[in-house]
Image (cartoon, coloured by chain):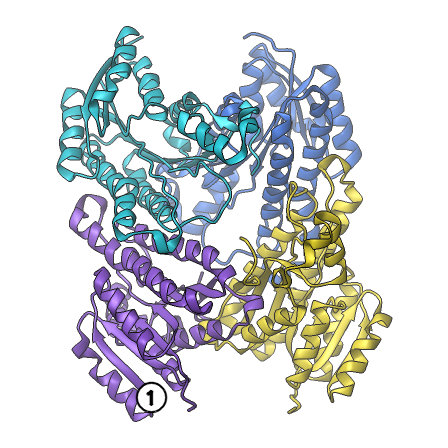
Chain colours: A purple, B cyan, C blue, D yellow
Amino acid sequence: MTKRNATAAVIGAGDYIGSEIAKKFAAEGFTIFAGRRNGDKLAPLVKEIEAAGGEIHARSLDARKEDEIVSFLSDADKHAPLDVCIFNIGANVNFPILDTTERVFRKVWEMACYSGFLAGREAARLMLPRGQGNIFFTAATATLPGGPAYPAFPGPKFGLRAVAQSIARELGPKNIHVAHLVIDSGVDTEWVRQRRVEAYGPDALNNPDLLMPPSSVADSYWQLYQQPRSAWTFEMEIRPFGEKW
Amino acid sequence: MTKRNATAAVIGAGDYIGSEIAKKFAAEGFTIFAGRRNGDKLAPLVKEIEAAGGEIHARSLDARKEDEIVSFLSDADKHAPLDVCIFNIGANVNFPILDTTERVFRKVWEMACYSGFLAGREAARLMLPRGQGNIFFTAATATLPGGPAYPAFPGPKFGLRAVAQSIARELGPKNIHVAHLVIDSGVDTEWVRQRRVEAYGPDALNNPDLLMPPSSVADSYWQLYQQPRSAWTFEMEIRPFGEKW
Amino acid sequence: MTKRNATAAVIGAGDYIGSEIAKKFAAEGFTIFAGRRNGDKLAPLVKEIEAAGGEIHARSLDARKEDEIVSFLSDADKHAPLDVCIFNIGANVNFPILDTTERVFRKVWEMACYSGFLAGREAARLMLPRGQGNIFFTAATATLPGGPAYPAFPGPKFGLRAVAQSIARELGPKNIHVAHLVIDSGVDTEWVRQRRVEAYGPDALNNPDLLMPPSSVADSYWQLYQQPRSAWTFEMEIRPFGEKW
Amino acid sequence: MTKRNATAAVIGAGDYIGSEIAKKFAAEGFTIFAGRRNGDKLAPLVKEIEAAGGEIHARSLDARKEDEIVSFLSDADKHAPLDVCIFNIGANVNFPILDTTERVFRKVWEMACYSGFLAGREAARLMLPRGQGNIFFTAATATLPGGPAYPAFPGPKFGLRAVAQSIARELGPKNIHVAHLVIDSGVDTEWVRQRRVEAYGPDALNNPDLLMPPSSVADSYWQLYQQPRSAWTFEMEIRPFGEKW
């Protein structure tokens, strides 16, 4: 591994997608700044990346707090120039409209949209003076098919996409690649496996080709990172080959 | 005018679109409940509707406050069954990403998306037991073309659309018509006229066919209201014939 | 009924949607020019419209033949100014890709897209010198849910939409209203009823709210016709309230 | 270069995008089958690929002729298993609706949509028995901004996209990757450069960041080819970083 003088920040470094992204970029020589609500849970990731010879700084981070985002990204940038910022926070709640409290509606928006805006803005602030960088957003994904789409969730989802698109249009000509990765399938996590079994019975997991391995998401980000600026993709939709769409 | 035993609530009864909607539904026999931030500004509308023999109740209403929405709609419903609820609050701010404060981002969302969720939910709560009703949303419209679309605004705009669509899918089969009216042009208001002159010079207003008369928006809502339930439209996009799109 | 000095041409005047459109516009005082492949089948429609005091000219028309479209519309226009042209030809075939012959692929395109182009162009040619008119397209609708969407059909469907949109953008500023009506459900025809029973069993028709009555399509066209030019809709999507979407 | 036992067919191997695709896949070890209307014009490409140690078979090919597509792809497959088929034929005509002859409308569809259907179907026929393959479509691109979009062109463009999507949905679960590459900018060709100078004056080419280098298109196809089947992209949109969108 050749060490780069560059950091990659992963906001929402959960056990699955976020961790795989961190490992991929660490393996490519980036110093990783990984943040999640409870930073203690990052211990296994730190161990794995360091064992592989990579460098990672793990932090507790509430991405809905402006000052926490500011200091997280600014610390990353002080360590080495912030080259990549990946926002990877999802929020997945399903309530009928009458049961959606204002507190839930607001909280889901804060997690899935507002915190994405904060991350994008602060990454841009650090990248613009150097005239380069990459800001990527993972589209919140619906993991369980069927049933009406309930109000709280799709609002922030489309809101985040709109934020990403606006930033992309504004920052593209300034040499900052902004992309929005849409995962059009369930991702292979313990939580999704359990939901599928609950919804469809024990046979639900027989077809391994219907769940996206988290490492494939990381690989897709690496593809986006490698695109030359003469052919940047803003939105990339990925799904396993067996997915019905 | 034949008086109906039904109320139509207009949330965001501004001087232009909201007022025209109120006048149209008043003229069709509905009792109007009109709310806007500063209820005192509703005096001319009250005068005009009452002079024409209509009935209107004007209220100060901060649509971002859950309790205010709850009591506004519930008062309307106590007066006569709430048959129509039209959410008509826009928010239009344009800042580059670095200049968009968290306060502005949050406020725009609260005005354009969160308050729409509150209105939709509370209207649904009142309409569902009777098994009928109409909930309409005016899509926030971009009044000035050109320039990059900035982050704060499109997020809530797409968020509101997603909220409206979720509600439509959930409530349609329960006989409640939910629609989203998209105005794809500038609306003929004093503010828009001034912005156009500033942006394009004194000739900007020479072509009267490029601005949407507020009363045409009201007529479009009336069309939506009249649709039989066997052929409901969820999204209706309107533009003046001279608009370039 | 007040007779108008205007004709409405219905291209694809089938037993259901097309006939209802013809009856609606005849009842509103238009002289109808109705064309379908086998003009003899128009006899019941002629009888019904004439019994109601309306005027209709029935023709055999192969809409894929340029000269037939030219003379059909030009005859209509000679009778009285052509004010409305409604293209209502569908084509619905479902084959897996390997089974789609080039003959089928071509034929479906000719019926669903190419003939729509011919109709739009010739109507425009007659309307432009007078500076007014209405050209409406019925979006081919998928009547049976489920299964993969097969290649022959969606191509022409999206092609027709693109043709309609291009014409709308070009002719709108010249005061010609071009619209595209999307029927997002099965329409209540004998053919659709049979398919549903075959696909879902005898209970498939228990819920009458899931099929669009053909007369509701006609009513939607009448709404589009009545829109003031200050608020024209290009695309209107309609579905029965009970439809799951 | 490691030689592969696989062919890549390029249908529409023009001087720019098509040639770059052929060179890229040749450099990766594929045997290339390259077809264009006038096969003689492929001489420089053959020379370049062979000089670099690659293998290419150049053919005259009218992609609108079913038998020519059948024999072109089947010859490719006989040489070595057909692993990649890239359909790269564009058609770009701009006429106002009244000036669009039926001949032009039909011809553009045959070039941009019908021939894509033929290519996709025949590639699928060869790939399905082996249970693997890649079928990629270059989205016809609008190279000149401004002015109304005219009728002939967008129809086939959306038709091709619909064909590609249908094939993708049908063949994805059978392990064939179908993708649609959308180039959202002008491509750097002599023809586009001349049009830009004509439209905007001699300064139109000052900003080299606004034209897509043809080799970047080829690189994007290579990215698509490399995607693991656990994370396939159907549609990928690419634009140069300086493009306004």
Task: State which quarter of the image contains the N terminus of chain D.
Answer: bottom right
Q: Position of residue A230 (x, y in %)?
A: 58, 67
Q: From what the image shows, is residue D5 above or below residue B78? A: below
Q: Position of residue A54 (x, y in %)?
A: 33, 88
Label 1: element kind? loop
User: Residue at point 60% right, 51% down?
Assistant: D158
User: Residue at point 73% right, 63% down?
Assistant: D189
Q: Is residue A93 visible?
A: no
Disc 1: which chain? A
Side of D132 relative to C213 (left or right): right
- Depth order, front residue of A216/C13: A216
Q: Position of residue B121 (x, y in %)?
A: 22, 39
Side of C236 relative to D84 (left or right): left
Q: Give the amino acid at mark 1.
A: Gly
User: Residue at point 24% right, 64% down?
Assistant: A63
**Residue at image mark 1:** A54
